[in-house]
Image (cartoon, coloured by chain):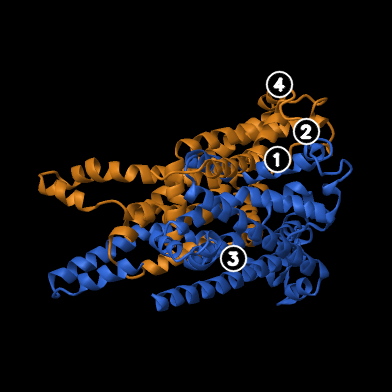
Chain colours: A orange, B blue
């Protein structure tokens, strides 16, 4: 172990505290607002009140509950579809030898860079014509534009690290190909697939532009879009407390997931980007 | 990618016959596995963009759907000759350049803290993943509410005037938009740069230290040049992302009020609020072209920088 002077320790402590404050203050502010009564909202203090009124309001609000269900359902289905399709592609990209690998990878990258606003208008027109406007599939389909490339990149990066020889070794030891796959490869691949699924889910959960333009009612409107159109007693007044409470509700599960799987998420994020 | 090519030539070397049959089967399997993903990606992006291009050549307003007619490039002429488009391009560029530059500096600082920290690496990583995981709309609300006179806390801080109302001016609103964007996306930048930092060999630093180079000299002469590809990749991702910015300004100044309209918000206003699909699609296609231009510039830069590095080694 290297010796560190007190001065160095102090500097590092300051650096780390600055980073922690940077990351946490805005979150703390919105959490603090969510517990305030209308009288306390303007006091400019952190955690001056501990009223749960705002949470009661949003959990009795049909629009918010519908949006929550839409968000969970749409993001989950989009994640499931893109992970299945991407896992097949990533297996081929990382394990099989064929021409066109580079084309598929750069194509996926190009799709990932795609500006969503460029297709919003045509989707709006098409979806109204064929009845997909304001439906779950109407959002799940455009979500593929960003979930699929992300899943392909992260999964190929993870699959490249799998020691595939173990599969043959198991077969030499007498396992059937299916056993070798199920008992050796699946446990090795599962954590990567799971991490990719979390990342994809976060992206789908985050979408605002498609949800905002391709939905209009509780039938398919997701939480980010519902938040933007949340109105209070008067139509022109934003209910700050209720929005903050809703914001906390949609943020907490994601933060918990991110914190539990932080190591893998960092690996997935950087592996996908650096190898691309 | 280079490893894939290397194994490709190695497996192609053995005599033909059985091997080539197996290779054919492998190729077929590979394409069958990739086909669904490739087809879906083409359908969900290629078809709508082609349709957007078609719409952009029409006079097509949903309020008067019967007046639909082919007008060639007239919509592009209308967009490119309007001062709104150009002022929105400038607003978007201001947000893009300011936020990406700030993110690069902050992200590098955080990456260095994480890379060299003698303790506390775990908490730092956990903390910076929080902005990353938060929904952009929520992050925008958090910053808006922090600067809003009716709910904010920044006015209680020292050095900040109680009467300052950033959300009532263009400059102030852009500042809040940039801060929200920087806060949300710096973690991603920091993680990419951290991965790049890990590729800089420690021996080089040790050798330079022995030669008497200061920490700052080592950072600018060793770390930065070796990280050039990683920095360019991070800048590429973030620049393209920032240029498409929609969620944050939409929440902080609804409708692009006070001159905060970005090109994506302009597209939204024309397509969805004014339901003028012809004119709006021209804006969509122009944004698409801008993104391609930015990407091409970066990819060229990336190509020359990796070539330079290979030449040096």
Where, by quadrant of the figure, is residue B18 drawn?
bottom left
Q: Is residue B12 left or right of residue A215?
A: left
As drawn, the label of residue B5 is none
As drawn, the label of residue A239 is 2
Q: Is residue B210 left or right of residue B157?
A: left
Residue B164 lies, in percent from the top left, at: 86, 45
Q: Pointer 3: what residue?
A: B49
**Element type where label 1 sits in the image:** helix
Could one spot residue B185 in this view of the protein? yes
Is the residue at mark 3 from the same chain as the one at mark 1?
Answer: yes
Q: Nearer the viewer, mark 2 or mark 4?
A: 4
* Vertical comparison of B200 with A35: above or below: below
Quadrant of the drawing holding the C terminus of chain A: bottom left
Q: Pointer 4: what residue?
A: A50
Quadrant of the drawing holding the N terminus of chain A: top left
Q: Is residue A170 left or right of residue A249?
A: left
Tell me if label 2 and label 4 are in contact, CB under 8 Å. Answer: no
Closer to us: B161 or A84: B161
Q: Assess disc 1: are there few (<14), some (14-19) or many (≥20) residues with their C-alpha within 10 Å of its C-alpha.
A: many
Q: Assess disc 3: are there few (<14), some (14-19) or many (≥20) residues with their C-alpha within 10 Å of its C-alpha.
A: many
Residue A27 lies, in percent from the top left, at: 65, 37
């Amino acid at each position: 172990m290297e010796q560190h002077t007190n001065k160095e320790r102090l500097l590092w402590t300051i650096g780390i505290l600055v980073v922690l404050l940077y990351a946490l203050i805005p979150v703390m502010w919105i959490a603090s607002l969510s517990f305030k009564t209308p009288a306390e909202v303007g006091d400019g203090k952190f955690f001056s009140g501990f009223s749960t009124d705002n949470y009661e309001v949003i959990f009795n609000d049909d629009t918010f509950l519908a949006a929550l269900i839409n968000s969970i359902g749409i993001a989950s289905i989009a994640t499931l579809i893109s992970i299945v399709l991407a896992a097949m592609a990533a297996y081929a990209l990382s394990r099989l030898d064929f021409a066109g690998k580079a084309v598929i990878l750069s194509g996926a990258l190009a799709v990932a860079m795609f500006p969503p606003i460029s297709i919003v208008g045509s989707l709006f027109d098409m979806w109204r014509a064929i009845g997909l406007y304001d439906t779950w599939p109407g959002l799940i389909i455009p979500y593929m534009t960003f979930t699929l490339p992300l899943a392909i990149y992260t999964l190929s990066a993870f699959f490249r690290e799998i020691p595939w020889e173990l599969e043959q070794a198991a077969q030499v030891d007498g396992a059937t190909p299916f056993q070798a796959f199920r008992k050796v490869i699946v446990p090795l691949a599962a954590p990567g697939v799971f991490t990719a699924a979390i990342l994809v889910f976060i992206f789908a959960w985050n979408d605002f532009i498609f949800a905002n333009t391709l939905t209009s009612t509780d039938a398919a409107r997701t939480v980010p879009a519902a938040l933007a159109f949340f109105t209070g007693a008067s139509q022109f007044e934003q209910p700050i407390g209720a929005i903050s409470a809703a914001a906390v509700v949609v943020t907490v599960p994601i933060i918990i997931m991110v914190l539990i799987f932080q190591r893998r998420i960092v690996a997935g994020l950087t592996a996908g980007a650096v190898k691309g | 990618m280079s490893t894939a090519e290397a194994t490709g030539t190695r497996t192609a070397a053995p005599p033909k016959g059985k091997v080539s049959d197996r290779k054919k089967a492998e190729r077929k399997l590979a394409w069958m596995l990739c086909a669904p993903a490739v087809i879906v990606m083409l359908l969900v992006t290629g078809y709508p963009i082609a349709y957007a291009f078609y719409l952009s050549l029409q006079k097509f307003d949903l309020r008067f759907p019967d007046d639909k007619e082919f007008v060639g490039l007239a919509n592009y002429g209308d967009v490119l000759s309007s001062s709104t488009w150009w002022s929105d391009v400038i607003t978007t560029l201001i947000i893009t350049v300011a936020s990406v530059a700030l993110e690069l500096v902050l992200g590098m600082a955080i990456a260095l803290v994480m890379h060299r920290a003698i303790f506390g690496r775990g908490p730092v990583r956990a903390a910076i993943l929080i902005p990353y995981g938060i929904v952009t709309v929520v992050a925008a609300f958090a910053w808006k509410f922090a600067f809003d006179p009716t709910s904010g806390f920044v006015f209680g801080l020292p050095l900040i005037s109680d009467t300052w109302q950033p959300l009532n001016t263009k400059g102030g609103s852009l500042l809040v938009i940039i801060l929200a964007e920087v806060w949300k996306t710096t973690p991603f930048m920091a993680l990419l740069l951290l991965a790049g930092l890990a590729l800089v060999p420690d021996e080089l630093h040790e050798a330079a230290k022995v030669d008497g180079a200061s920490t700052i000299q080592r950072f600018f002469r060793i770390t930065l040049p070796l990280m050039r590809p990683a920095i360019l990749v991070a800048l590429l991702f973030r620049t393209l992302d920032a240029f498409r910015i929609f969620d944050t300004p939409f929440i902080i100044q609804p409708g692009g009020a006070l001159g905060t309209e970005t090109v994506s918000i302009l597209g939204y206003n024309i397509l969805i609020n004014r339901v003028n699909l012809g004119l709006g699609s021209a804006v969509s296609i122009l944004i698409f072209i801008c993104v391609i231009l930015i990407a091409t510039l970066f990819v060229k830069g990336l190509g020359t920088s990796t070539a330079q590095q290979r030449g040096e080694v």
